[in-house]
Amino acid sequence: MFCESLIVGFICCTSEGVEVPKFQTCIMVWLHVKRGDESQFLFDTTGDVLVEELTENITDIYNGRLKVQRICTEMAELADHGITLPVNMQGLTDEQIEELKLKDEWAEKCVPSGGYIFKKDDIGRRNGQAPNEKMQEVLKKTADEAKALISKKQAQTNVCVTMEMVKDALDQLRGAVMIVYPMGLPPHDPIRMEFEGKEDLSGTQAALEIIEKPDAQLWWAGKELKRTEKLSKYVGKNEKTKIIVKIQKKGQGAPAREPVISNEEQKQMMLHYCRRQEELKKLEEDQDDSCFNSEWADSNALKRQFQGVKNIKWRPG
């Protein structure tokens, strides 16, 4: 069952002064949020919610999931190659750093717990002082757990993603970093900047994926959901409603509508068609009297079995 009705009870008084319980039904609606054709997450809400509030809540979760994914990507690099170098040292060779007399002042301050293992960063973005294997496991395992918490696979198991789950994932990541780097990360490290909300994504692909709240739009069935209306105006008051909404930026026009059948359903139909074609082909190849060639149709089989002449093959001498 994709949604449920919440019964909210309250007390009202009759003209005779007798308190009679009265109930109000709150319709629950499940929204399968997509960006383009790509599934994002499930979100549950009520039909009475204003589209403006709904849009802001979905946008917060959408952008929050992107933040978690960015941090997890950086944490994998942190585990493999240590903290990031200062901006003026990134991309330089050791000879260039020595020639320019540059020094990473944070290398001595931000040493991972248990010491480090030198593992050079080939692109010259991090200092190469990677945590030991135990601390690497802490970072990578936590990153995997955080990604699983807000994963797109949650939609396949009918699990709704909430802002609390996004915050929980961020707290787990923050805690893992504090365990490995109790003194903290350099102020220029992208992980610390993400935690502090100071990330600079200008000129990156990640910046194009983010949708600001004022620019966010929700579309369903080829129609834009107007912010001033309630959701029930579009989906009705059916208590078993599950719809696919698409989030995008203003000015991008209407997104492509959902296909009549999904890719998986189309694959299953094609597989069924191919199997049916093979079955029909085999039936055409078989003769009507082919069954008489079977062993059970041989009337002399029992006689040959008693005489011990079963399965005798002849060949010219």
Image: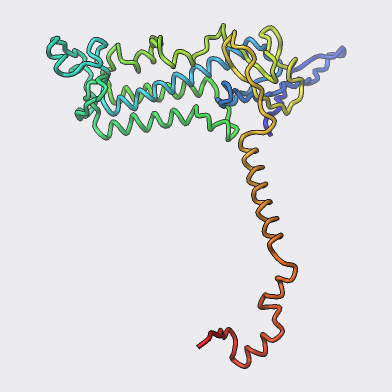
Q: Nearer the viewer, residue 222 or 298?
A: 298
Report the residue at 50% width, 24% height from top: 165
Residue located farthest toward the bottom when viewing the structure as drawn: 307
Q: Residue 304, percent across and down?
A: 64, 89
Q: Is residue 62 above or below residue 133?
A: above
Hey, which quadrant is residue 226 in on the image? top right
How many numbered callouts? 0
Q: Is residue 39 above or below residue 98?
A: below
Residue located farthest toward the right when viewing the structure as drawn: 16
Q: Quadrant of the N terminus?
A: top right
Q: Residue 205, percent across and down?
A: 43, 16
Report the residue at 47% width, 13% height from top: 208
Report the residue at 18% width, 12% height from top: 105
Hey, which quadrant is residue 295 in on the image? bottom right
Q: Residue 233, percent across and down?
A: 75, 15
Residue located farthest toward the front when viewing the structure as drawn: 317
Report the residue at 59% width, 8% height from top: 251
Q: Nearer the viewer, residue 116 or 203?
A: 203
Q: Residue 162, percent across and down?
A: 55, 22
Left or right of 18? Residue 84 is left
